[in-house]
Image (cartoon, rainbow, N blue to C red):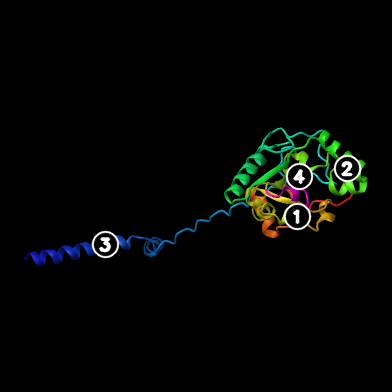
Amino acid sequence: MKKIMTVLLVIMLALLGLSVYSYLTDGQRAAAQATPTPTAVSTPTPTAVPKPTPDFTSPDSLLIVANKTHRLPEGYVPEDLTWSVDCGTGACYMREPAAIALQGMFAAASNDGVNLTLLSAYRSEEYQAQLYNGYVASYGTERADRISSRPGYSDHQTGLAADIGSSVNPAADLNAEEFKATDEGQWLYQHAHEYGFIERYPDGKEEITGYGFESWHFRYVGTDIASAIYAVDPDETFEEYFNVSGGTAYAE
């Protein structure tokens, strides 16, 4: 009896479903049978962030250029000069980022058994004038322009440059070939970029930089840029990498 009642109930429910379905319109039936297609959600394309243009002229830029075709602002003095490391001349100040990096580089070299000495760092325009005029008096203008900068055009005046020497072989200081051959010169050539410094006047690049080979002269540009320049070539110049003008002739 229960089985019969169950069968009758199922039949009644089926008839009820057919009755409801018969009242649906053709469109409603199609919609009921169709599987809805998910709507595609478009993902917006991210906007590329342009790389900043290097700033070669602003007084606070770490890439400010000083060479024979780029004069620094008249009477330029960096605002963030601070003590770097001890040196013999007393001109031991550098811009703060460069001073901190120099301290780290000297400490790292010492850990490797290489003891660097700082020969010269920031120079004022007035002090550079004294040096340059002395070279002119001793050697004449042509040679002075190869080995020294006129006031206002010196890399040292940026507060980002350092002349570095050997504590073991000071006789090699300021002699490009001899200093390069020292342990200090070799260590700097291989590691200075790791601390944000580049060799500013590489061998064979006088026509580009305006100055003869100075294996002791290093310029702070920041770790990322120094490493990028070194990756191109350890002897890549600032002018070549950034495609800025240089050369041996003064713009004035």
Mark 2 and mark 3: Cα distance apart in space: 109 Å
Q: Residues within 10 Å of mark 1 (few under 14, many from 20)?
A: some
Q: In terms of depth relative to the viewer, which is nearer, 170 or 205?
A: 170
Residue 134 lies within the magenta run = no
**Quick one: label 4 or label 1, which is nearer the N terminus?**
4
Q: CA distance from mark 3 to mark 1?
A: 101 Å
Q: Earlier in the sequence, mark 2 or mark 3?
A: 3
Residue for badge 3: 17
Disc 4 target residue: 56
The disc labelled 2 sits on which kind of residue? Tyr
Q: Earlier in the sequence, mark 3 or mark 1?
A: 3
Element marked by disc 3: helix
Q: Residues within 10 Å of mark 3 (few under 14, many from 20)?
A: few
- Can residue 74 be seen here? The reply is no
The image's mark for residue 134 is none
Reading the chain from its start, which is encountered first: label 2 or label 4?
4
| Contact flag, marks 2 and 4 (Cβ < 8 Å) | no
Percent position of residue 62, x then y: 70, 42
Between circles 1 and 2, the one closer to the viewer is: 1
Q: Secondary structure at mark 4?
A: loop
Which percent across, then down, holds residue 192?
66, 51
- Residue topped by disc 1: 178
C-alpha separation, residue under disc 2 versus residue under disc 4: 28 Å
Q: Amino acid at mark 4?
A: Phe
Residue located at (32% from left, 63% from top): 22
Q: Residue at x 16, y 62 (%)?
A: 9
Residue 7 appears in which quarter of the rendering?
Answer: bottom left
